[in-house]
Image (spheres, rainbow, N blue to C red):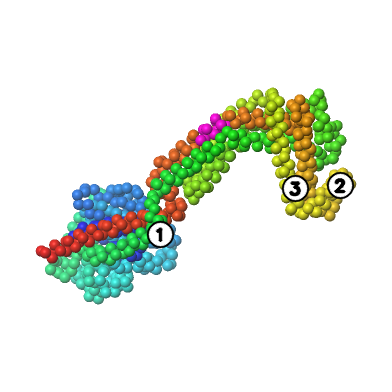
Amino acid sequence: MMVLTRKMIEIRNILTQVGQSNTLTLPSIVVIGSQSSGKSSVLEAIVGHEFLPKGSNMVTRRPIELTLVNTPNAQAEYGEFPALGLGKITDFSQIQRTLTDLNLAVSDKDCVSDDPIQLHIYSPHVPDLSMIDLPGYIQVAGSDQPPELKQKISDLCDKYIQAPNIILAISAADVDLANSTALRASRRVDPRGERTIGVITKMDLVDAERGASILTDKKYPLRLGYVGVVSRVPQTTTLFSRGSGNITNAIVKNERAYFSAHPSHFGPNSETSVGVPTLREKLMNVLEQTMARSLAGTRDAISQELEEATYEFKVQYNDRPLSAESYLAESLDSFKHSFKAFAESFGRPQVRELLKHELDQRVMDILAQRYWNKPIEDLSEATLDVDPLKDLPKADPENLYWHRKLDASTSNLTKLGIGRVATTVVASALQQHVERLVAQSTFASHPYAQNAIMEACNGILNDRFFSTSDQVENCIKPYKFEIEVEEPEWAKGRESVSKVLKEELTACEGALRRVEDQIGKRKLKDVMSFVDKVRKGEAVLEGNGAGGAGGFSAALLEKGREGIFLRDRADIIKMRLLAVRSKQCSTLKNKYYCPEVFLDVVADKLTSTAVLFLNVELLSEFYYNFPRELDQRLGRHLSDSEVERFAREDPRVRRHLDVIKKKETLELALQKIESLRQLEGRSRNAGRGE
Ligand code: GDP
């Protein structure tokens, strides 16, 4: 019949995976007792090894859920912490150290925690038992312990000693039973003494008569009775056998020597029940019976929980199956798919446009610096020999001044570090696109995957950056010395720069309107005309101008200057737009009149050359490597627990997975409990038949 306990323990462990809901607990033996009552000694005598934390500093701070599994055909004895994944531990002092560490991880401030430690012990010498060791009761909290500790321990024990659990109340023989905290606690929850086993330790410390009278106590009667033990490890046990061998025999031998010396009190014909083997036997029987009684109730509880989980799965998730691996694989697939679609839409023409646009801006800046610098801040510039704006349309092709100006501008453009600029523009475009794809993908709610993807992306781009920008820079090198332009290129450049100038004009006018909107059209007009007057010397800025003048605040004056800048810039662009469209600019011969067109042609040549190499060095490489890098980081190289952790980052996925897991676990538990009931039914019938 012992098979029942074993199977129930198995089911109990399955159910703990679902989370400890109150209805779903299977009975266990809960061990309570005051500090130093001999609680650890009893448990160790049953297990046959010293494995519990020892020390004066409150070393049991968390419940230890101890599952003993009898392995009749095995030689080895070992322990396992299922939640820690440390594997089999055959050295019990290692188990002791681990338990000590786990307990001491609870801070001195809290001192106790209700988060249980699960420990399984497999041995041919242990019975199938499920026991829970709790922190020992204390009388008063020590000076370095929180004052509420006594209450906290008591509350924690109360939580565990509820029905249907069996209470193993440990009291020492040399302490008056009336003072036993364990018995008092048990009485509170089990007033009729129906599910409490009394264990009296240290029987050797009182005389036999007194010992026997404790065991037959009538004042605190317990239906399951009292068992007296001498569970201390005898001093004679060698260090060697204490460390590695099984200590049960030594304890039992020592204990038997004591009890058999007093046959009238403890012999087979006495009323008392004594010895660790008797206790073991009793625990097994009581647990077995309790489990058998709870079989039907537990079955109902499980099937009800299962119904709820099944319903939730249907209603919330439409019975859609999901696993962490399938979720990751699908997410990765669809991300790679969207990346492929992007890669197909972002090729040479797009890179070309991007880069040309960037260079157009640089061309505008160079033009503004070298040609369009109509004196704004400093009127003294009007005294220059040549007023560039006025003079440009008739710029003399023979005049070295205009040659130098165009050469310098061209050189500004070719030497601005095209390699770096181009690579940066394309790399950051790729990066932004990948960011956008991530944001639109299921990975959006997975910080871990997001990081991995962006690291993969940036890793490749960084790797390629220097060689790409070097290559590009090398290839445009010839343009730094000479640029040949053909008439058709000129015509195209003229078209192109007209468009750019128009856009620039629109941008300027838009900016001016925004300033107007900020301070009002009228006010802007007033402050601009004041600033204009200052420029022309018709008005003065009082003081140093910082505090404001002409009735305008410093901030308003600043807006006025901005307005004038934008207005003037718009005027210049309009004029230059007319010039570019004029007949004069229709031919390459007049390139000195039309630096805009010339620089556009140069920008276009630089762009074309750069794009060729960007395509090979950066784009193709990126498109080839990125999906592979994703596979590396998010594909098969992740461990199961990493995949699980990834999937669980998304709360919706986590809930979905939880429901499935709960359903599967409950189904398994239910299946096991059904077959157990059948087994039990059969053996009951067989019993009757005999
Ligand atoms: P716990 O604090 O309740 O876990 O108590 P321990 O099992 O650590 O025991 C406290 C002390 O009592 C230790 O020094 C043990 O050696 C001693 N002890 C435990 N059981 C017995 C026993 O049956 N007889 C004697 N004489 N001492 C015992």
In the picture as drawn, the residue positioned furthest to the right comes out as 538
Q: Mark 1 points at which residue?
A: 315
Residue 512: numbered disc: 3
Q: Is residue 621 located in the magenta-colored stretch of the structure?
A: yes
Of 104 and 429, nearer the camera is: 429
How much space separates mark 2 and mark 1, taking CA atoms? Answer: 76 Å
> What span is in magenta?
614-623
Q: Name the residue under label 2.
A: 533
| Residue lying at 32% horizontally and 64% vertically, measured from the top left | 304
Q: Earlier in the sequence, mark 2 or mark 3?
A: 3
Which quadrant is the C terminus positioned in?
bottom left
**Tag 2, which secondary structure?**
helix
| Residue lying at 57% horizontally and 33% vertically, measured from the top left | 348
Q: Which amino acid does label 3 sit on?
A: Leu
Q: Name the magenta segment's main secondary structure.
A: helix
Q: Quick check: 517 above or below 21? A: above
Q: Where is residue 294 in the image (x, y as percent from the top left)?
A: 26, 65
Q: Which amino acid does label 2 sit on?
A: Lys
| Residue lying at 21% horizontally and 60% vertically, measured from the top left | 678
